[in-house]
Image: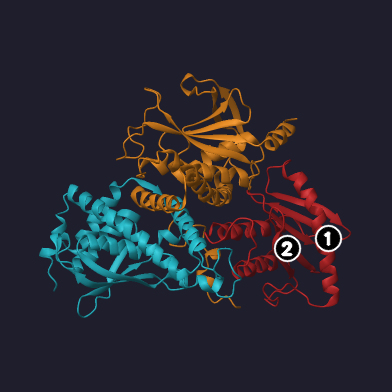
Chain colours: A red, B orange, C cyan
Amino acid sequence: MSSPVLFVIVGRNEPLFEAEIDTAHSSAIDSPGGGGGGGQQSELSTRQNYFVLHSALDLVEKSAWTTNSMYLRVVDKVNQQQVSTFLTAANVKFMLLHGGKGEDVIKNFFNEVYGYYVKLSMNPFYKYDTPITSKAFDARVRAAARAYLS
Amino acid sequence: MAMSRSSTNILDRPLGRSGGRAEGSVVSLSAFAYIYSELVQYHQQRAASISELERRLESAGYGVGLKVLEMTAYRAKEVSGRPWTIILLLDAHCSFVPPFSLIRHRRRDPPSRQTKRETRLMSILHFVSSSVWKSLFGKAADSLERSIDHADEYMIIDYEPIASTFVSIPPDLGQLSADAYVSGIVAGVLDGAGFTARVTAHSVKVEEGEYTRQGGNIIPGIPPRKDKAVFLVKFSPEVLTRDAALER
Amino acid sequence: MSSSSKAQAGQALWSKMPKANAELFALTYGSLVTELVRDYEDPIEVNTQLDRIGHSIGVRCVDELLSKADLAGLGASSTMCANLRDTAEVVAKVGFRMFLGIQAEVGGFSQDQRSFSIYLQENPLSTFVELPAAGDDDYQYGAGGDDLRKLKYSNLYCGVIRGALEQVNLKVECNIVRDTLKGDELNEIRVELKEVLSDGAGDDYKEE
């Protein structure tokens, strides 16, 4: 059974990118940039999700210096929700809120997104720690989520 | 899908191969020097003083450093081995005022395929003077030294820094401004990785017999410099505190 | 000199040139372009500035090309550039090769032989670049995403060619007409001869 996941990239102080992805869809039904569902219930759960992600940030800061791995695994659990995190070399945080996926598939997802992120960040027109507005990046992240997390 | 250009999008190509070139490819040093001296001139026209010009070049380098950090770390997952064993040695040739000790390093572990971040002060310094230097300048920095008197100060030394070796700098500007760009790159790498530091470039006269080129000519056709570039790295107190805490 | 001997000359010169990392080159140029975009905002004005900067490079690099070609015994500059076809070949096969290590092709001569194109498959200036797509939100450098589509990122080439040919008494106009950053399959620089300047080295220049 697939549940929606929430993927957020957080810079030094604020989110730079977010995508809510319903991994149950194998085709591209989500509207790029707009997130998954539109109903009231979905919005409520999204708000809860942000709360969970936000509180996990402190835990990420703590574990950041105790391991030299980029993949920090699950850093926080709230009810059924887990927060997995990946830290890039420049300490940009990739955070995935999910209902319990395997460590390996999450790691593969993060690694693929990292590749896209590095290519995006090499672009002279992309400045470090600024919001990511590239539609191509959004599409790649969603495709990667569906490929690995379904 | 709305991705009509998906097949040509840069995100779908190997890193740095948009023009079909492989990692590690080169252009002529002249071509780099032409572009770089235009960058210097452009900032010079807008700077009221040499120190402002240096700040502008440092700032240009800083943005490049942040990119280089991710690029180098991303690629390192294929080839790198960590951690390093650190041996501190005193070397008569490397005395600088205040005295610095030469740090030699040697790889201990077999290469791993994990993506790694640098979390310790010594490992980020080696990352900069070795991996970053190699990826940008084709060779490791000539030495990495630690201040004996100041625990927060390190020096990265390059006898033939690319940015100033071949770039014609107006005589009134001197060598300092040319190396400012590279010190900005170093600052960008360090700050991005969470090791905030003030990095300054210094031009220091090479003592007789201090340095001879390996194989005669590292960069054929380029006369040796009279000065070596010294990049002085002064870490912020929080960085040292954190690193000391990790030691325990 | 024939086209293939020029290609050989370009390769010979390239092999002797001291080298620099192509990515540092691309990032440094990127830093210059983004600085211009920030300072001038209007991408059309940025194109003009890139052309101006290129011109100042072209003036200097033609000297390097001619003196290194002479040193290598590749013939005097006058015989290398006997007519516009030869000149075009030298720009593409010798110039682009010796400075950037890339293969450039010449073609598309107009009927009156006064204009031609240089084709580049690879472009070391734009290695990491993706222009903001039409629908992307504004990038942080002054101009909006749609506006940046007017930016000719590699317009430096035009200035370089213009400046270099001016040194050998050829006044040309130069435009990027195809650009891989805009989705074209290759880069095409159109060069049009405007005037043969009549002093000095241009005296023995014959139009066909």
Q: Position of residue B47 (x, y in %)?
A: 47, 50
Q: Residue at x 46, y 32 (%)?
A: B142
Relative vertical location of residue A102 with respect to residue B156 in this rendering, above or below: below
Residue B58 position in % (x across, y down) = 52, 46
Q: Which mark is residue A7?
A: 2
Tell me what residue is drawn at x 60 percent, y 23 percent. Answer: B149
The answer to whether residue C63 is above or below residue B82 is below
Residue at point 40%, 32% (across, down) = B227
Q: Which mark is residue A51?
A: 1
Q: Does residue B195 appear to the left or right of B144 in the view shown? A: right
B69 sits to left or right of B218? right
Q: Position of residue C82 (x, y in %)?
A: 14, 64
Q: Amino acid at mark 2?
A: Phe
Chain name for mark 1: A
Closer-to-camera residue (A97/B102):
B102
Pointer 2 chain? A
Residue at the spot x=45%, y=61% of the render? C126
Viewer-closest of B220 and B37:
B37
Most distant residue in the left direction: C204
**What's the residue type where badge 1 is placed?**
Phe
